[in-house]
Amino acid sequence: MADWRQQVEALRAQAGELPEGDAKVRALEEAVRLVDVHGDVPLGYELRDSLIDAATFGGYPDKALVAFAWCRGQQKKDPQRFDPEDILWKQKWVVGRLDEFPHISRKQIADALDDVEQGFAKLDAGRRAALKLRYQMARDMGDTAEAERLWEEWLVAPRDHLTDCRVCELDDELDHHVDKGEWEQAIQKAKPILDGRQSCAEIPHLTLGTLLYPFFKLERMKEARDCHVRGYAMVAKNREFLSTVGEHLEFLALTGNLSRGLTLLEKHLGWALEHASHRDRFSFYTAASFLLGQVVSDGRDEVSLRLPRAFPLHAVDGGYGTGALKDWLDSQARDIAARFDARNGTKRFTGLLARNEVLATEARLFPLD
Amino acid sequence: MDHRFQVSLRGVIDLLSHHLYSSPGVYVRELLQNATDAIRARQQLEPQATGAVGLELREKQDGGPPTLLFTDEGVGLTEEEIHRFLATIGESSKREQLEARRNDFIGQFGIGLLSCFMVCDELLVVTRSAKGDGRTLEWRGRHDGTYDVRVSEHPLDAPGTHVYLVARPDMVEWFTPERVRQLAKHYGGLLPFPVRLTAEGKTETLNPDGPPWRRAYETPGDRRQALLAYGREVFGTDFLDVIPLRSEAGDVDGVAYVLPASPHFNAKQKHRVYLKQMLLSESAENLLPEWAFFVKCVVNANGLRPTASRESFYEDTVLAKAREALGQSLRQYLMDLAHEEPRALQRLIALHGLSVKGLALDDDDFYRLVIHWLTFETSLGVMTLADYRRSWPVVRYTPTLDAFRQVARVAAAQGLCVLNAAYTHDTALLEKLPHVVPEAQVAPFSSADLPQSFEELTLDEREAVYPLLRLAEGVLAPFRCAVEVKKFFPAEVPTLYSSDAEGAFRRDAERAREESDDLYAGVLDGVMAGTGGQERALLCLNLHNPVVRRLAAVEGRELLKLSVEMLYVQALLLGQHPLNAQEMALLNHGLLGLISARLDEGGGGGSSGPGSRGMH
């Protein structure tokens, strides 16, 4: 009996030493299965609690959700044993990403949001956290008017212990300004983050990607380059940041650094092919499609790339027609956009895809080398 | 008119001493910092000025508290600067300006002097500016926040500043010659101008030699010995080796020491850092790339910005570039080892494998150099990747320990070499192989790949097992598990259950679904609908196994069904796959059924015992 417990502890210790990413998630999954074989519910709960963290910060929102659903079931069955507060905090992470799965219906998302709010209400807290969640969902699903209304409500709601940290909230605020083209304001708000005075687990990783386009628009290229150089290094090894990698890809394409852009495509296409978040896949494919469009415009018909074997057009000799590559990326993005827009009943994703045409007119050479 | 906030100086000092300063001893640091800034400013005006700092302890004849006279040959202060710097604390309109001039001088002069009020009640600053009219001014500040300025009756001969501190009676222990010497050496031991201490009638220079890594040595061997000795003095550790560090960005130089034992993975090493040759921190963290946790270093930086806590540097572009350059210094060391002393590198890998692997992931050239020397556990024993690739064209690896355990024994029995890549970085390293070494082939391996290596049945055997196969297929269909019969080793293993990673996750999701409510059951369905790979699991029966052989000859359907069910559950449990509710029921009913069947045999009871009815 002691043997399996030792194995579980060894796996837990191993996971504890690993950086966020695949290996950490795998180690904890393995530990959870081992515990389940032996039916130890409290230990299964504890390890899944760690698994939710690892999966959330390591780019596996599907695995976070599965682990969460199990814990939630146990917590409801035995609320004495399993503290609701802890799981409510993590419920924010899980519910905040439901919209990234096109097979989850609007009704299910709405019910899950209501459920969060009811959970928070029982503790008489979390109003601000719930409003942010609703604002972000409305924004991501393209309910512009609703998002606008919730934005106003969110910002005036008082903070409490269920509110995300100030830095994370600040980063979330930036999206609103970038959506509206308020470049200066986004940059100004982000100053404490840019200066390195404030940070969190995923900040400034996300922020530096968000600000690439605003800096580009304002022609503050030195700062844009800094954001790229610093920011890409922070996100390059964790699939959680696939969408941010897409922002870097877009920046490289916009500034004519096409070779660098293709290197990013080589490195990260594998993530996109199997990423659970279709929203992140979409961001990446859209940026990659823009990049290939620029390569085509540059007059190049063929490129040599080391793409993963799982890629449907995989060529053993590494030679790819740029047109065909662009078409494939485009069709992926278009397909996901269609599914999201159909589910959401809005046109947001089609709109995001169309943005590529605008970007093509804005491209401006700024060699990084 | 504008009014000003009244700020209690006492209160501010209290705040500073509790939150900003670690001990009253930092007053020496702050005085040295002011002196350094003033000397630098002087050198901007007069490039030939060398500058010097003096600390003189004056004991009172009557046994009263001693006085410390702190002098510098710096730029001095004009009257306007006295008011601006000595009496204004953190005024916002000046902040930006100070920030812009940070690289020149006068860091935070006023704040620095404030720290002196931790050890004395009154400060006298006598100063003559190199820029002014030649007058010498006296500023007398008191801890209650009042001060006055006047022209001194004892003019200084040359520009510079003299600060007089009379020890507060309860703070005299911070004014003994030993304490002052130790503090001044600690903070200012690397300063580029002489720091002299006069006490008890003797004068000594506290920093005769400058940073040891910049000194000239007779031979490289002498240099190494001297620097290792310095490392021992600073960190109290006998290090394995010493590596020079240099970065243009941030103007950083120094030495890195190779730790004599494996540190905890990603352990943040605490480095000793000097800023413009003044000690900044003994626990700076964010100076090196993440993978470089196998060294501790001592460095001086002239162009990096410290954070307020002084434990790390601001995460800005300069720091990013400096970090990259320092990483390059370490990488160069490892590259040189690989080329010149491969054995030493192998010893280093044994000790600091995680750092080496971390760098290899970041850096293709380095990867190419070391990857084949790394050792891995395989189903056929421990070997280097070079050994592996010499014998097997495709590198087959399992990404988890669990997957390795499931295949290792059977794979070894078939003569298959499968590599365990469950340890930190291993999977990522192997996946990188074809990108760096184009002819290399790597493939993840799981139990699902094993049956391909198993021996097919003969035509006669096929016929013989056909009824078993058909029945088993029917029994396991509800569990989305296919069935095959093959021959493999070791013969004691009756079955092999296999599914891909997707399948294992699907099973996790099923169990979560069983435990959860309608809302989340529905949500889980939505998530799982998006995942591909509906591939079924596979139960492979081993005809080399005597039990399976006998089973193929059994005619009673009930017993056969029961046996297949139990083999299935056993295979799951052996592979450490948790059972879902349906499988758990199978196990419970099956056990009873088997006992009952056995009792029927032995007890000679009717063929419709309670146990066989209990099965479904």
Image: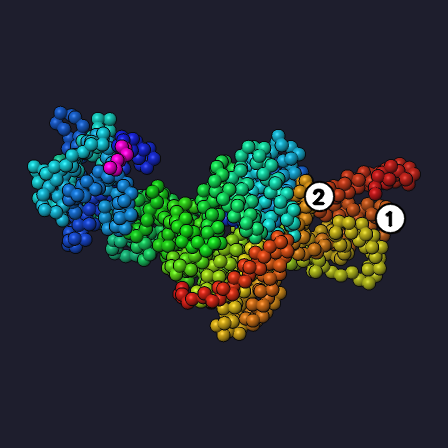
Please report the bounds of the magenta region as a residue range: B1-7
- Distance, label 2 to label 1, CA atoms, is 25 Å
Residue nearer the viewer, B68 or A147: A147
Q: Quadrant of the C terminus of chain B?
A: top right
Q: Which mark is residue B557?
A: 1
| Rendered residue at 43%/46% (across/down) | A199
* Quadrant in the rendering for residue A257: bottom left
Amino acid beneath label 1: Arg
Which residue in the protein does label 2 denote? Answer: B579
| Rendered residue at 64%/41% (across/down) | A70
Please give left or right for residue B350 compared with residue A280 in the image.
left
Residue B424 x/y as whole percent? 52, 50
Please give left or right for residue A268 compared with residue B571 in the image.
left
Indicate the chain on which mark 1 is placed.
B
Residue B470 x/y as whole percent? 83, 55
Instruction: Examine the rendering and report whether any part of residue B346 can be seen.
Output: no
Label 1 secondary element: helix
